Amino acid sequence: MPKRPGTSWNMFFREHMYKVKASGKPVVPTVEGAVAAELWKNLSPEEKQVYQDKYKTNFEAFKQETKDRLQELTPAEYKVENQRRDALRKAGKKGLPALKDPNAPKRPLSNFFLYAKHLRETGKYAHLSLKEQSKAFAEAWGTLDEAEKAKYTERNRIAMEAYKIEKAAYDAQAL
């Protein structure tokens, strides 16, 4: 996986350390850290903005590289990476969510959501806000007769069977 870029402060500090080493002066990291921190505080907002812009550019490139790399991973590699991340989380590392494979089969919509999708497509509820639409769909579902609900239940059952077959084939790749 690509390595996350350093922050604007990290870039400034590395640049400072490079200058100190190039000068031939002996490097004491704790002392140079304090010097660099003071120099950073005294930078004007425009000077800091240069580093912040570099960071932003590097971070966007990192996000794109990560996205591209995730597209390339096989199911087995996703499994290994998620196991590694899980072990790091158990060891106390924070901010490492499990990766979700964009190529994995998606679960089908439930009976209710199939019905809500149908209602959305009719356009009858388009004038309502999303919250009001949700309430209207729930009311409509509640008043729907069992024969009509059975249609959506059957669609869901067929889609779920297809999903289970796809999921089993996908999981077999991860072994």
Image (cartoon, rainbow, N blue to C red):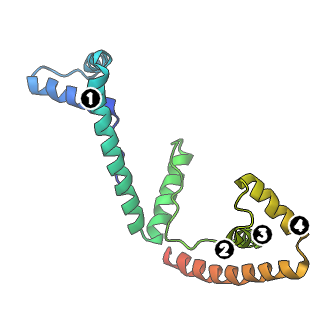
Asked whether the residues under the numbered discs 4 and 1 touch, taking CB atoms below 8 Å apart as contact, a structural biologist would say: no
Viewer-side label of 4, 2: 4
Q: Could you tell me if the residues under marks 4 and 3 are in contact, i.e. CB atoms within 8 Å?
A: no
Hey, which quadrant is residue 109 in on the image?
bottom right
Q: Residues within 10 Å of mark 3 (few under 14, many from 20)?
A: some
Tell me the quarter of the picture where residue 13 sits: top left
Tell which tag, 1 or 2, sits nearer the viewer.
Answer: 2
Numbered badge on residue 142: 4
Image coordinates of residue 16 in percent, x first then y, are: 21, 25
Amino acid type for the residue under numbered disc 1: Phe
Crowd around label 4: few <14 · some 14–19 · many ≥20 (10 Å):
few
Q: Looking at the image, which residue is at 63% across and 79% down?
A: 163
Q: Give the Cα separation between the discs numbered 4 and 2.
A: 21 Å
Of circles 3 and 2, which is in front? Answer: 3
Residue 142 at least partly seen: yes
> Which label was assigned to residue 12?
1
Picture layout, residue 6 above or below residue 78: above
- Separation of disc 4 and disc 1 at Cα? 61 Å
Q: Nearer the viewer, mark 3 or mark 1?
A: 3
Q: Amino acid type of disc 4?
A: Gly
Task: Work out which quarter of the rendered image holds the N terminus and state it.
Answer: bottom left
Q: Nearer the viewer, mark 4 or mark 1?
A: 4
Helix, strand or loop status at disc 2: loop
Where 35 falls versus 134 (above or below)? above
- Comes first in the chain, label 4 or label 2: 2
* Mark 3 or mark 1: whose residue is earlier in sequence: 1
Query: Residue 112 shows which numbered tag?
Result: 3
Point out the tag, 4 or 3, that comes first from the N-terminus: 3
The residue under the point 59% across, 71% down is 106
**What numbered label is drawn on residue 108?**
2
